[in-house]
Amino acid sequence: MITDIDDTKLPLLEHLIELRKRLVRSAAVVLIAFLPCFYFAPAIFNFLALPLYDAYGLAPVEEDEEPGEEGWFERTLNDISLLFTEDGPSDEETPDGNVVTEGTTIDRSVESEFPPRFIFTSPQEAFLTYVKVGFFVSLCVSLPFLAYQLWAFVGPGLYRKEKTVVLPFMLVFPLLFALGAAMVYYAFFPVALQFFLGFQQGEALGKLPIVMEVRVSEYFSLLLKLLFAFGISFQLPLVMTLLARTGMVTAQGLKEKRKYAIVAVFVLAAVITPPDPFSQLGLALPMILLYEISIWCARITERKKAQAAGEAGDAETEQPDIEPEDTDDLSDFEETDFNPTR
């Protein structure tokens, strides 16, 4: 008799009502979280724009330090304090009268024809971008509650052994996603922006200036796409470990299919990243490393399964022998035509 599963049987309509209740609660929490997130959307967007702010060379530096000595992460922490203040970084006069922001590494003055800035080309673009920013952050804030609602709906239908497998994976999923998103924000995206800004061209004889003018919606869409791409790709070891526990893949099979997996990784990176080889390599190389980690995780899972199977076999062989009952004592049997007494 199965005792490790909820034996409550509900009709299909009851399951649909339960699902609707979970969805309504999730939507209500996301909506409630959206209101404060939308209020702080400009500051949140400024935080997301710090990689471009630094790529322009606008991050302020200390007077007693040479530019470049302070790391990007340290400068980012210093820049966060500027997001909630109306005063920008200190400016200084140049000999020709132009105002140049302290610490600039690109020769683009603030009062020039093409200053470092964001632009929007439709009246509602900035507003809709703030709405998207608020909704994205509200989803991130509500993720623990959403995961609980999913578990509350699915959990009662799982066996105890299945719960011990699924629950740890649900806890590890947001951690790996956050690790992938942090890699984009702190490591990959700043380098990519520095690379793209290198294609700017100053005005000279016979040359027209080439200046990067970034739209707010395109910048946020690009960053959001990269955050999701890296966050999902970092789930590869988790998925492969789960498939190895179910027996659908093996470590040897993953090793044999390595060359096909590398080709598939580059194709996938070309589809989900912007159309440039730098972004494709930036996603493909970590995914190849994650594939190798998946092989290692699958091998550990197989060893644990083999060890558990061996212990179960030893337990069956060590069961005590049951003494046979004495068949000579037939006094308790009633004499009939089919069992006459001796």
Image (cartoon, rainbow, N blue to C red):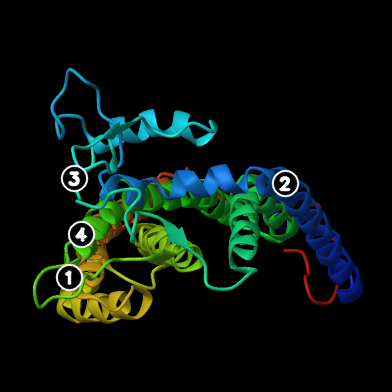
Decide if residue 310 is in sight here.
Answer: no
Spatial separation of the CA atoms under disc 3 and disc 1: 46 Å
Q: Could you say which disc has been placed on residue 105 in the image?
A: 3
- Amino acid type for the residue under numbered disc 4: Leu
Q: Which residue is mark 1?
A: 255
Q: Are circles 3 and 2 on residues that touch, CB within 8 Å?
A: no
Spatial separation of the CA atoms under disc 1 and disc 2: 45 Å
Spatial separation of the CA atoms under disc 4 and disc 2: 36 Å
Q: Could you say which disc has been placed on residue 67 in the image?
A: none
Q: Residue at x 17, y 70 (%)?
A: 255
Determine crowd level at label 3: few under 14, some 14-19, many 20+ residues with C-alpha closer than 10 A. Answer: some
Disc nearer the start of the sequence (1/2):
2
Spatial separation of the CA atoms under disc 4 and disc 3: 34 Å
Q: Is residue 294 above or below residue 90?
A: below
Disc nearer the start of the sequence (1/4):
1
Picture coordinates of residue 93 (x, y %)? 27, 34
Residue 95 vs residue 269, the one in the foreground: 95
- Amino acid type for the residue under numbered disc 2: Ala
Disc nearer the start of the sequence (3/1):
3
Q: Is residue 123 above or below residue 292?
A: below
Q: Residue at x 72, y 46 (%)?
A: 33
Picture coordinates of residue 289 (x, y %)? 20, 59
Secondary structure at badge 4 equals helix
Q: Residue at x 15, y 35 (%)?
A: 68
